[in-house]
Amino acid sequence: MRWLSFLRDGNETFGYVVVDSDGSEGVVDAGARSEFVSLREAIAADALTHLTGSCGDQADVSLPDIDYLPTITDPAKIMCVGLNYKAHQEETGRGGEGYPTIFVRFADAQMGHNAPMIRPLESTSLDFEGEIALIIGRAGRRIKPADAMSHVAGFSIYNDGSVRDYQRQTSQFTPGKNFASTGGFGPWMMTVDEIGDLDAMEITTRLNGEVMQNATSDLLVHGFAEILEYCSTFVELQPGDVLVTGTPGGVGAARKPPVFMDEGDLIEVEVKPIGTLSNPVVSEVAS
């Protein structure tokens, strides 16, 4: 099942994708048909299966007409794993300490599928980082690897847009990872049961149609279960929390010459079998 957050008549809501007999795709507005106001709330109540039964399969809106929001609009935590593919460690000359490199994003730095990614006024070094995002379904602290997947609601796609000069001003990544509208998140969450082999997810980042990054999830240095175990050691993970699992090699800053994003570009991150997250790039306009 694919679950998403979106705007309908100017109001935030959430729902799931259904396929009509003619193959057309639509969305059931579960927010309008239930007491839950967000996908995070529905996940926290363990209500997704109940909602698909009670809300039915009659679409309320066509999928092409959706105004997407970040898959989880109100996560309590967004934790990102840096330097988590060997090729990315090699191209940056960093990583390999034996523990995941963790930094945080804030929810208001995110935007949904098809929304513009904004290159800020302060920089010309906006870079792409296509990633797989893991969404927590069940709370847990000190989660054991063997139990990790029972705490996962599903997977989504993330573009951890990075303002490289601000990221590198100090040893801390936070400034370069939290400019407004630089964290693409979507288009939806695919539940674990539909993913299949979790080690066979293929991630591909394309800039204006040209492949920049490509890898499979089995190449993660720290796998999904290990990330869950590590992060849940120092915080209690809550339903709707987002763990962004790392980017493959091929980022723009490591290329010769560097390749950064600017006005008019289209950045796409595809994760098979989940789908494709697309964002046009625009330059911020001074107010």
Image (tube, rainbow, N blue to C red):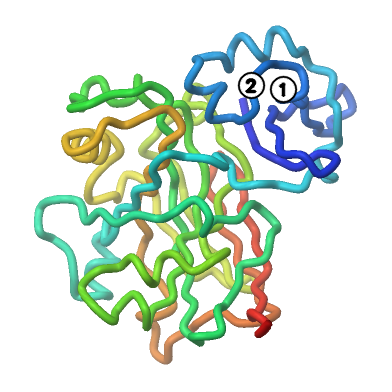
The amino acid sitting under disc 1 is Ala
**Image spot of residue 250 (x, y percent):** 40, 71
The residue sitting at 44% across, 78% down in the picture is 252
- Indicate whether 118 appears above or below 255: above
The nearer-to-camera label among 1 and 2 is: 2
> Going from the N terminus, do you reach mark 1 or mark 2 first?
1
The residue sitting at 70% across, 57% down in the picture is 114
**Image spot of residue 264 (x, y percent):** 70, 79
The residue sitting at 64% across, 81% down in the picture is 283
Image quadrant assignment for residue 233 = top left
The residue sitting at 34% across, 54% down in the picture is 104
The amino acid sitting under disc 2 is Phe
Q: Residue furthest front?
A: 287
Q: Is residue 116 left or right of residue 133?
A: right
- Label pair 1/2, CB-CB below 8 angstroms: yes
**Image spot of residue 72 (x, y percent):** 55, 39
- Indicate whether 197 appears above or below 273: above
Which label number is shown at residue 193?
A: none
Image quadrant assignment for residue 77 = top left
Which label number is shown at residue 30?
A: 1
Q: Which residue is mark 2?
A: 36
- Judged from the image, the secondary structure of the residue bearing numbered disc 2 is loop
- Judged from the image, the secondary structure of the residue bearing numbered disc 1 is loop
Which quadrant: the N terminus?
Answer: top right
